[in-house]
Image (tube, rainbow, N blue to C red):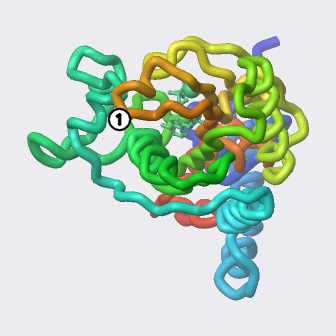
Amino acid sequence: METHTWSQTQTQRLKELGADESALSQPYATAADRNLAFQKLEKQLVKSARSDLARFLTREGKPRFEQLRTALCDMLIAEGFAQVTTPTIINRAALAKMTITPDHPLSKQLFWLNDKQCLRPMLATNLYSLMVDFGRQKHRPIRFFEIGSCFRKETDGARHNNEFTMLNLVEMGSTDPDPSPADLLDRLKDLAHKMANAAGITEYEFETEESDVYGSTLDLVCSRTGTELASGATGPHPLDAAWGVTDPWVGMGFGVERLLMSARGDTTIGKWARSLAYQDGIRLNI
Ligand code: ATP
Ligand code: MG
């Protein structure tokens, strides 16, 4: 018997409104049955989104993204990390030090403002610069992180936004004067566990990936969906020489919207982006 499932437009609308996966795959005997069911379901979802929005506008608590941001920052500060704030606009020379020159894959994803300046696609350029300045201090380890917007021209919308929030942490130098690569990797994993824990993510694993910038990276991946949540690297690293960094280090960049999406069991990232279509995960055209 022929069955009818949602049209593409219906699926799209139901997804925007946050329908359950089970509701999205429901088959119907006729198109008329299906359309009737759609109307009913859409009405219910709109009603519940309207009450979510009313609560969002009147409640005292922070939106979920801000709750996550606070949880991550508080955890890192308690772990001895200093929070830094650096410019969103960076220059061509800094990118070149990361080997991002015109023939590099990432260079096609850059938003240029003029000949020399673009919106940062990553935090690492600025953080490398701080590693040098902070490195003049005597104590080790030196720990710091930044959380802020990064910009990349992307084509896949389910897991990518053109503007997203990265949290990049760096720990430079160790109490051990000569840590082994295995020690550094352990420390990187330890920090990744702490971040996943603070984000409320329990189902995750580590994967070794090839990166266009860092060579081999240690990725934190959501086990349920396979979505990459973070990429980390350790040094001494071939990029260090261009900046004058000589200490061993570990560093990892997390996509904060991806952490939120993963913690909440969502399959798309759009509703957690900076947006005019959603606030606090609630669809606004209701
Ligand atoms: P992907 O392969 O998923 O495009 P990537 O390896 O290019 O990601 P990295 O450069 O490793 O990304 O950036 C660190 C983290 O930032 C990623 O693990 C991911 O969580 C997040 N991230 C990267 N690009 C985006 C994007 N366009 N939108 C949302 N989050 C992103
Ligand atoms: Mg990566």
Q: Quadrant of ligand 2?
A: top right
The C terminus lies in quadrant: bottom right
Mark 1 CB within 8 Å of ligand 1 = no
Picture layout, residue 244 above or below residue 69: above
Q: Is residue 162 visible?
A: no
The residue closer to the viewer here, 138 or 153, is 138
Say whether residue 245 is left or right of residue 5.
left
Residue at the limit of the structure toward the right, as seen here:
202
Q: Residue at x 80, y 43 (%)?
A: 196
Q: Residue at x 76, y 14 (%)?
A: 2
Rendering coords of residue 32 (x, y %): 70, 37
Residue 25 location, quadrant: top right
Residue picked out by circle 1: 153
The N terminus lies in quadrant: top right
Residue 250 location, quadrant: top right
Say whether residue 17 is left or right of residue 236.
right
Rendering coords of residue 272 (x, y %): 60, 53
The residue closer to the viewer here, 154 or 2, is 154
Q: Residue at x 69, y 77 (%)?
A: 56
Picture layout, residue 78 above or below residue 240: below
The residue closer to the viewer here, 71 or 65, is 71
